[in-house]
Image: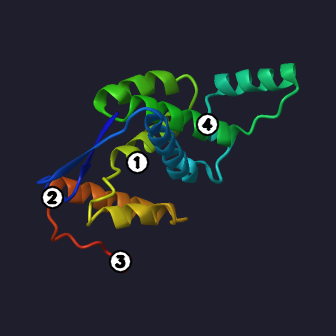
Amino acid sequence: MHEKNDLDDQDEIELEVVYEQRKVFRAVFEQFIQCRNEIKQFFHGISYGDIYTIEHLNFMNEVEQHNGLYLNRRLLAAIDIAYCVTFYGVSAEGVTILERIFKPRYSGQLYRAIINYLRLKPTMNSKVIWPLWRSLARRRSAEKRNLIVQYIYDYRNSKSAKLIYPQSR
């Protein structure tokens, strides 16, 4: 497995990391866990109807009743979405596949918000954006999260280090 990491925001230097044998599984598993942890915030305080389609909720109810199970539906959705994103990625082709998988299961508003959020994720070595990205997980206010996401989006479009994150808002 090959992974490229940008060492600065101008993409002047790249470091290629090669994972071999069992380290490949460990690296993929770590990416899955990181993805799951990053998207958990999307499931706080929303109803099952805002997560799943009605058809999929009915299917899950049948599975629970037929097998005498209790399903933690928020956790199940977070795991399923994180697994699919880790496997297919969020490139243009990956998003097309994810849309096809998620459409019959999840609310379009939810899975599109998650995909858009993950597509904005910078590399860990981005000196300007990575600290802001890390702060997103600590934000309880959707307004503040949206402000940071907008800043990251604007920064990427302009590639200007002169942009100043509005801390006071």
Relative to residue 22, is residue 127 drawn left or right?
left
Say if mark 2 contacts mark 3, CB within 8 Å: no
Q: Position of residue 17 (x, y in %)?
A: 29, 44
Residue 53: name its quadrant: top right
Question: Is residue 15 at least partly visible in the picture?
Answer: yes
In this view, the mark in front (2 or 3): 2
Q: Amino acid at mark 4?
A: Ala
Give SS at disc 4.
helix
Marks 2 & 4, CB-CB < 8 Å contact: no
How far apart are the two marked residues, 2 and 1, measured between alpha carbons?
A: 19 Å
The span from disc 3 to disc 4 (Cα, nearest Å) is 33 Å
Residue at numbered disc 4: 77
Residue 70 % position (x, y): 82, 34
Residue 60 in picture, x, y percent from top left: 73, 26
Residue 107 in sight here = no
Residue linked to disc 1 = 117
Q: Earlier in the sequence, mark 2 or mark 4?
A: 4
